[in-house]
Amino acid sequence: MNQDIRTFIALGSNIAPLEQVSLGLLALSRLPASRLGAVSSWYLSQPWGFEDQPEFINLVAELWTRLSPQGLLAELQTIEERSGRIRTRPNGPRTLDLDLLLYGDEILDEPGLRIPHSGLLVRDFMLLPLIEIAPDAIHPEEGRPVAKLQDRILYHQIICRIRDRA
Protein backbone atom coordinates (compact mmCIF):
# COMPACT_ATOMS: atom_id res chain seq x y z
CA MET A 1 0.00 0.00 0.00
CA ASN A 2 1.66 3.23 -1.17
CA GLN A 3 -0.87 5.86 -0.16
CA ASP A 4 -2.14 6.89 3.26
CA ILE A 5 -5.75 5.85 3.80
CA ARG A 6 -8.03 7.99 5.95
CA THR A 7 -9.61 5.87 8.67
CA PHE A 8 -11.68 6.57 11.74
CA ILE A 9 -11.37 4.73 15.04
CA ALA A 10 -13.93 4.85 17.87
CA LEU A 11 -12.43 4.67 21.36
CA GLY A 12 -14.45 3.76 24.43
CA SER A 13 -13.81 2.77 28.03
CA ASN A 14 -15.66 2.42 31.30
CA ILE A 15 -12.85 1.03 33.48
CA ALA A 16 -10.48 3.88 34.42
CA PRO A 17 -11.81 5.59 31.28
CA LEU A 18 -9.90 8.89 31.36
CA GLU A 19 -6.61 7.04 31.65
CA GLN A 20 -7.52 4.32 29.16
CA VAL A 21 -8.71 6.56 26.32
CA SER A 22 -5.66 8.80 26.84
CA LEU A 23 -3.38 5.76 26.58
CA GLY A 24 -5.39 4.53 23.59
CA LEU A 25 -4.80 7.80 21.73
CA LEU A 26 -1.10 7.64 22.57
CA ALA A 27 -0.92 4.07 21.26
CA LEU A 28 -2.71 5.08 18.03
CA SER A 29 -0.19 7.90 17.55
CA ARG A 30 2.63 5.34 17.71
CA LEU A 31 1.25 2.80 15.24
CA PRO A 32 3.62 1.86 12.39
CA ALA A 33 3.00 3.46 8.99
CA SER A 34 0.30 5.65 10.55
CA ARG A 35 -0.28 9.13 11.91
CA LEU A 36 -2.99 10.45 14.18
CA GLY A 37 -5.19 13.19 12.76
CA ALA A 38 -8.18 14.98 14.28
CA VAL A 39 -9.65 13.84 17.59
CA SER A 40 -13.25 14.54 18.57
CA SER A 41 -14.55 15.84 21.86
CA TRP A 42 -14.85 13.27 24.62
CA TYR A 43 -18.39 12.19 25.55
CA LEU A 44 -19.88 10.58 28.63
CA SER A 45 -22.27 7.87 27.44
CA GLN A 46 -24.69 5.40 28.96
CA PRO A 47 -23.73 1.76 28.47
CA TRP A 48 -25.12 0.10 25.35
CA GLY A 49 -26.26 -3.51 25.23
CA PHE A 50 -25.50 -4.46 28.84
CA GLU A 51 -26.71 -1.64 31.06
CA ASP A 52 -25.65 -2.77 34.57
CA GLN A 53 -22.17 -1.24 34.38
CA PRO A 54 -20.45 2.16 34.69
CA GLU A 55 -20.85 4.92 32.12
CA PHE A 56 -18.43 5.13 29.20
CA ILE A 57 -16.18 7.77 27.77
CA ASN A 58 -16.37 7.71 23.97
CA LEU A 59 -14.62 9.61 21.20
CA VAL A 60 -13.51 9.19 17.59
CA ALA A 61 -10.03 9.68 16.16
CA GLU A 62 -8.93 10.13 12.57
CA LEU A 63 -5.96 7.93 11.65
CA TRP A 64 -4.05 8.08 8.37
CA THR A 65 -2.42 4.74 7.67
CA ARG A 66 -0.70 2.55 5.13
CA LEU A 67 -1.66 -0.59 7.03
CA SER A 68 -4.20 -2.90 5.41
CA PRO A 69 -7.63 -3.11 7.06
CA GLN A 70 -6.68 -6.49 8.50
CA GLY A 71 -3.28 -5.20 9.65
CA LEU A 72 -4.88 -2.19 11.30
CA LEU A 73 -7.45 -4.38 13.03
CA ALA A 74 -4.65 -6.59 14.38
CA GLU A 75 -2.86 -3.51 15.74
CA LEU A 76 -6.08 -2.25 17.38
CA GLN A 77 -6.64 -5.63 19.02
CA THR A 78 -3.06 -5.62 20.31
CA ILE A 79 -3.63 -2.18 21.87
CA GLU A 80 -6.82 -3.48 23.51
CA GLU A 81 -5.01 -6.52 24.89
CA ARG A 82 -2.18 -4.38 26.26
CA SER A 83 -4.77 -2.23 28.05
CA GLY A 84 -5.86 -5.34 29.94
CA ARG A 85 -9.05 -5.93 27.99
CA ILE A 86 -10.64 -9.29 28.65
CA ARG A 87 -13.61 -10.25 26.49
CA THR A 88 -15.86 -11.99 29.01
CA ARG A 89 -19.25 -10.67 27.91
CA PRO A 90 -20.41 -8.89 24.74
CA ASN A 91 -21.01 -5.19 25.45
CA GLY A 92 -19.74 -5.65 29.01
CA PRO A 93 -17.32 -3.43 30.94
CA ARG A 94 -13.97 -2.90 29.28
CA THR A 95 -10.69 -1.13 29.79
CA LEU A 96 -10.49 -0.08 26.15
CA ASP A 97 -12.57 -0.72 23.06
CA LEU A 98 -11.20 0.30 19.66
CA ASP A 99 -13.58 -0.01 16.71
CA LEU A 100 -12.57 0.57 13.09
CA LEU A 101 -15.49 2.66 11.79
CA LEU A 102 -14.35 3.60 8.28
CA TYR A 103 -11.34 2.67 6.18
CA GLY A 104 -11.25 5.00 3.18
CA ASP A 105 -14.06 4.02 0.83
CA GLU A 106 -13.69 0.28 1.56
CA ILE A 107 -16.64 -2.02 2.12
CA LEU A 108 -15.60 -5.29 3.77
CA ASP A 109 -17.52 -8.11 5.38
CA GLU A 110 -15.13 -10.74 6.69
CA PRO A 111 -15.15 -12.83 9.86
CA GLY A 112 -14.23 -10.42 12.64
CA LEU A 113 -14.06 -7.35 10.38
CA ARG A 114 -16.95 -5.37 8.95
CA ILE A 115 -16.31 -2.00 7.33
CA PRO A 116 -18.15 0.30 7.69
CA HIS A 117 -18.73 -0.73 11.30
CA SER A 118 -22.27 -2.07 11.73
CA GLY A 119 -22.97 0.25 14.69
CA LEU A 120 -21.83 3.46 13.02
CA LEU A 121 -25.19 4.65 11.75
CA VAL A 122 -27.28 3.59 14.73
CA ARG A 123 -25.17 4.58 17.76
CA ASP A 124 -24.85 8.27 18.54
CA PHE A 125 -21.58 7.78 20.45
CA MET A 126 -20.00 6.60 17.18
CA LEU A 127 -21.66 8.80 14.57
CA LEU A 128 -21.81 12.19 16.32
CA PRO A 129 -18.10 12.37 17.24
CA LEU A 130 -17.27 11.30 13.67
CA ILE A 131 -19.48 14.08 12.29
CA GLU A 132 -17.72 16.53 14.61
CA ILE A 133 -14.29 15.87 13.06
CA ALA A 134 -15.23 14.80 9.51
CA PRO A 135 -18.76 15.88 8.50
CA ASP A 136 -17.96 15.40 4.81
CA ALA A 137 -16.60 11.85 5.18
CA ILE A 138 -18.58 9.64 2.82
CA HIS A 139 -20.24 6.53 4.19
CA PRO A 140 -19.30 4.04 1.46
CA GLU A 141 -22.50 1.97 1.66
CA GLU A 142 -24.78 5.01 1.74
CA GLY A 143 -22.80 7.15 -0.71
CA ARG A 144 -23.58 10.23 1.38
CA PRO A 145 -21.67 12.42 3.85
CA VAL A 146 -21.97 11.16 7.42
CA ALA A 147 -23.39 14.54 8.49
CA LYS A 148 -26.50 13.76 6.43
CA LEU A 149 -27.11 10.45 8.21
CA GLN A 150 -28.00 11.61 11.73
CA ASP A 151 -31.63 10.61 11.24
CA ARG A 152 -30.50 6.95 11.19
CA ILE A 153 -29.44 6.97 14.86
CA LEU A 154 -31.47 4.47 16.89
CA TYR A 155 -29.55 4.46 20.18
CA HIS A 156 -29.12 7.78 21.99
CA GLN A 157 -26.57 7.04 24.72
CA ILE A 158 -24.61 10.31 24.96
CA ILE A 159 -25.16 12.08 28.26
CA CYS A 160 -22.86 15.08 27.78
CA ARG A 161 -19.58 16.34 26.35
CA ILE A 162 -16.83 16.22 28.97
CA ARG A 163 -13.82 17.46 27.00
CA ASP A 164 -13.73 19.65 23.91
CA ARG A 165 -11.71 18.84 20.82
CA ALA A 166 -8.01 19.42 21.17
Image (cartoon, grey):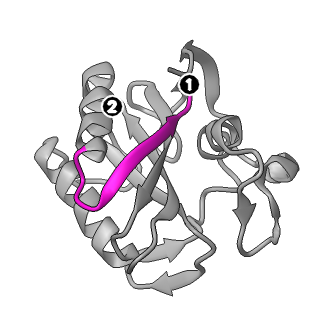
SS at badge 2? helix
Q: Residue at x 81, y 47 (%)?
A: 147
Q: Position of residue 28 (x, y in %)?
A: 30, 46
Q: Relative to 130, does residue 118 appear above or below in the rendering?
A: below
Q: CA distance from mark 2 to mark 1?
A: 12 Å
Q: Residue at x 62, y 36 (%)?
A: 129
Q: Residue at x 63, y 56 (%)?
A: 120
Residue 25 in the magenta stretch? The answer is: no
Q: Position of residue 118 (x, y in %)?
A: 59, 66
Q: Amino acid at mark 1?
A: Ser
Q: Relative to 38, does residue 66 appear above or below in the rendering?
A: below
SS at badge 1? loop
Q: Residue at x 47, y 42 (%)?
A: 37
Residue with the mark numbered 2:
21
Residue with the mark numbered 1:
41
Nearer-the-camera pick, 59 or 105? 105
Q: Relative to 79, does residue 1 appear above or below in the rendering?
A: below
Q: Residues within 10 Å of mark 2 (few under 14, many from 20)?
A: many
Identify the magenta region: 30-41
Nearer-the-camera pick, 22 or 84? 22
